[in-house]
Amino acid sequence: MRDGKASRRRLLDAAAVEFAAHGFAGARVDRIAAASGVNKQQMYSWHGSKDGLFDAVFDDQLQHIVDAVPFDADDLPGYAVRLYDSYLREPELIRLTSCNRLERRPTGDLLRDHRHLAQPKLDAIVAAQAAGRVVPELHPADVYSLVIALAGTWSPVSGTFTAAATDDEVDHDRRREALRLTVQRALTPAP
């Protein structure tokens, strides 16, 4: 039984790397099988199809994706900067999320089947709005979406420029400050 659990873990880890690198359409089950050491017959027995495997990978990674950075509704600028840094450390998470968005769930709430993951963050935004620390005019889900979108400005899925961990630290600092100031000015009430 223990070997089955280890094999499932290897499969999910290898599939996450493959889907993040190649997207759903470009991912190859043969490469996943080879990288994980799990044969395709067993893979299909566990997950039914490539679609089922992707769904299992996304579900497996989702908690980490949502909680990769501690959320603080009272410091949305700091949260945005920490997200920027997390995209540098783990670019595959944002790529996997984008793959799901582009190829699997192109519209609507990405977390609609997993509301329990985002709800504590939304509740914290509501509390911060009630305390006057976040602009009250915006819906909490919109505040959360804006912070994530702004933090992704230089992410691996940016349409303009993708930052890399190897970029000069001066460039990272400039981007962090731009992000901090933008989120602060957009979402924090004026004194």
Image: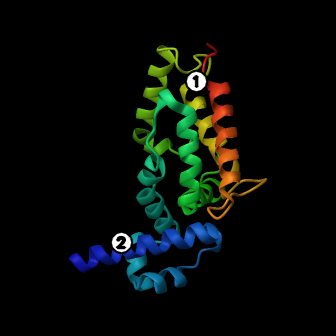
Residue 12 point in image, percent of width and height:
42, 70
Between the residue at mark 1 and the residue at mark 2, the CA separation in whole angstroms equals 38 Å
Q: Amino acid at mark 1?
A: His
Residue 56 point in image, percent of width and height:
43, 63
Along the viewing direction, whichever of 70 and 176 lies nearer the viewer: 176
Residues packed near mark 1 inside 10 Å, few (<14), some (14 to 19) or many (20 plus)? some
Q: Amino acid at mark 2?
A: Arg
Label located before the other in sequence (1 or 2):
2
For residue 135, above or below residue 183: above
Secondary structure of the residue carrying tag 1 is loop
Query: Is mark 1 in CB contact (under 8 Å) with mark 2?
Result: no
Q: Residue at x 25, y 80 (%)?
A: 3
Residue with the mark numbered 2 = 9
* Side (left or right) of 172 relative to 75: right
Residue 102 point in image, percent of width and height:
66, 56
> Which disc, if any, is residue 139?
1
Along the viewing direction, whichever of 125 and 96 lies nearer the viewer: 125
Residue 5 point in image, percent of width and height:
28, 73
Secondary structure of the residue carrying tag 2 is helix
Along the viewing direction, whichever of 139 and 44 lies nearer the viewer: 139
Q: Specify the quadrant that holds the C terminus.
A: top right
Q: Specify the quadrant that holds the N terminus.
A: bottom left
